[in-house]
Amino acid sequence: MVSPHLRFREISGDPNAIVQAIPDTEKYIAAISSDPHSSRHGRGQLLLQVHKMEVDGSETLKLKLRLYDVDSSLLRLEAPAPSQAALLDCCFQTESVAFTAASDGSIIRYDLHSGTNDAIGNHQDIAACVGYSIETCQVISAGLDKKVMSWDVRLANPLTLFRNLDAEIESISVSGFDLMVAVGAAVNIYDLRKFERAVDLKESSMDVGIRCVASTSYTRGYAIGSIDGRVAVEISNPLNLNSIRYTFRCHPRTKDGKAHLVSVNDIAFNPLISGTFVTGDNEGYVTAWDAQSKRKLHEYPRYPNSVASLSYNHVGQLLAVASSYTYQEANETEVPPQIFIQKMDGNDIGYSPEVSRDSSRK
């Protein structure tokens, strides 16, 4: 039985968290996405997708997309995936339409009222990520076939344009007219109104692969997370004044001076407070940062598993954290996944004048 509720429960001494318990038959959560359109009570729905493994003599893999209403704390929809392919990413188009990217390369559109779905197109390899631009009405997908594709689902033939890049793509971020694409150790920036070529190519200071990229909503800028625990931030000022560009490590070095290498799995910018963002890593830590002052604002109590995905609601009052096994490292703790809905307070978004500089890690 699927638990239909999100319920309040104190975790690790943190009373500001709501936790959604997922049954033990669940294996892991691939991604979560908050509805950018909903205005009810200033919160919004939460979209997530999971793998479900049921053992009935033979292991049957069931893949499902789920829609939760955070306001009422209820499961609104559970829609099966159209194939046995793994669902790897998801996004909203409207309150009633969502898209997923799957390991068989398919990009699937879901009707969130009826639960029905249809394929709008395919990549030639794993489709790793999908996003939607409200401004241009484009669905953007990318994957391991080294292609970024643009879809207009209003057309009979929805594929409108694709770009061949030089490397496999594991992360994209769409904000307004801007598309950020992580390619190897670089970020390609596109204007979706002129998608024929990149408007900017940013070589990062990292010599390792980029795990995730997140764009800002208030200006052209982004943050990227690497597989070795570093974060690079670049935020442009329209007047070319006080532009931000720097790199830092999320984890402090050990006493012997060695870097603590742990993958930064996801980054999310707060849509309410400019320059404030959170990182989630493979050891289960979520940390809030201020891009302007280069300060750590707050570190949440450690989550029970790796942080697979992060998503703010549309006004930045709630942060959804997917705590899940990610199959990246042999020493990961394989415990049932959970979704935590974290309420934001002054420490989380930079209102408090007193900012903790000490890490809670032991």
Image (spheres, rainbow, N blue to C red):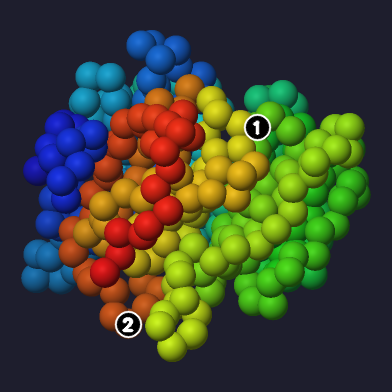
Amino acid type shown at disc 1: Ser
**Inter-mark Cα distance, 2 to 1:** 36 Å
Q: In the displayed image of the protein, which residue is found farthest to the top? A: 40
Residue ID for mark 2: 330
**Quarter of the figure that contains the C terminus:** bottom left
Relative image position of residue 351 (x, y in whole percent): 46, 29
Residue at the spot x=68%, y=29% of the render?
218
Q: Nearer the viewer, mark 2 or mark 1?
A: 1
Relative image position of residue 65 (x, y in whole percent): 35, 42
Q: Quadrant of residue 225?
A: bottom right
Question: Dot 2: few (<14), some (14–19), or many (≥20) neighbours within 10 Å?
Answer: few
What number is the disc on residue 233?
Answer: none
Name the secondary structure under disc 1: loop
Q: Earlier in the sequence, mark 2 or mark 1?
A: 1
Evaluate whether residue 158 shows in this view.
no
Residue at the spot x=21%, y=25% of the render?
73
Q: Quadrant of residue 6?
A: top left
Amino acid type shown at disc 2: Ala
Residue at the spot x=16%, y=50% of the render?
12
Relative image position of residue 131 (x, y in whole percent): 60, 41
Above or below, 207 relative to 105? below
What number is the disc on residue 217?
Answer: 1
Q: In the displayed image of the protein, which residue is found farthest to the front? A: 354
